[in-house]
Amino acid sequence: MTDYVLTGLVKRCAELAGEIEATHEKLKGLLANLESVDATILQFDTAYKVEAIRPKAFRPPPDWSHHGQIARMVCPYCGRRRSP
C-alpha cells in the first residue's frame, strides 16, 4: 500500500518542481522584457524616473462571481443538482 502512496508523492513532487522551474523561466523572460521597455523609455526621455513607475495591480472584473451564468441561460439543466 505504501508503494502507491510513495509513487504518487514522488510524481507530485516532480510536477511541482517542474512548475517552479517553468515559473522561474517565465519570470526571467518578464524581467528581460521589463528591462527592454525601461531602456526604450530612457531613449525617449533620459531624465525619466523609470523606478517611479508603480506596478499595475490585477483587479478582477466586477462580474467575476457570475461566470457560468450564460451556460445556465443556454442550457437550463447546467448547474442544477441531481436528486439522489
Image (cartoon, helix red, strand yellow):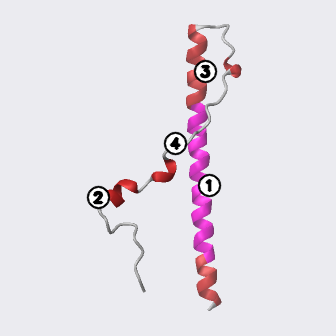
Categorize mark 1 by other alpha carbons within 10 Å: few (<14), some (14-19), many (20+): few
User: On the image, which quarter does residue 34 sit in?
Assistant: top right
Of label 4 and label 3, which has the lower sequence position? 3
Amino acid type, label 4: Pro
Residue at which label 2 appears: 74
Q: Amino acid at mark 3?
A: Asp
Disc 4 residue crowd, few under 14, some 14–19, many 20+, Cα 10 Å: few
**The furthest residue to the bottom:** 1
Q: Is residue 72 left or right of residue 32?
A: left
First in sequence, mark 4 or 2: give its number.
4
Q: Which residue is mark 3?
A: 38
Examine the image and state in which quarter residue 50 appears: top right
Assess whether mark 3 and mark 1 are in contact (beta carbons under 8 angstroms): no
Residue 31's place in the image compared with 17, above or below, is: above
Of badges 2 and 1, nearer the viewer stands 2
Q: Is residue 26 magenta?
A: yes
Q: Amino acid at mark 1?
A: Ile
SS for callout 2:
helix
Tell me the quadrant of the picture where the N terminus can be found.
bottom right
Name the residue located 35 percent from the left edge and 54 percent from the top edge. Answer: 70
Q: Nearer the viewer, residue 64 or 48?
A: 64
Residues marked 2 and 1 touching at CB (< 8 Å): no
Q: CA distance from mark 2 to mark 1?
A: 39 Å
Could you give the CA–CA distance between mark 4 and mark 2, rounded to whole angstroms? 22 Å
Q: Secondary structure at mark 4?
A: loop
The residue at which mark 1 appears reads as 20
Q: Where is residue 43? Give x, y as percent.
A: 57, 10
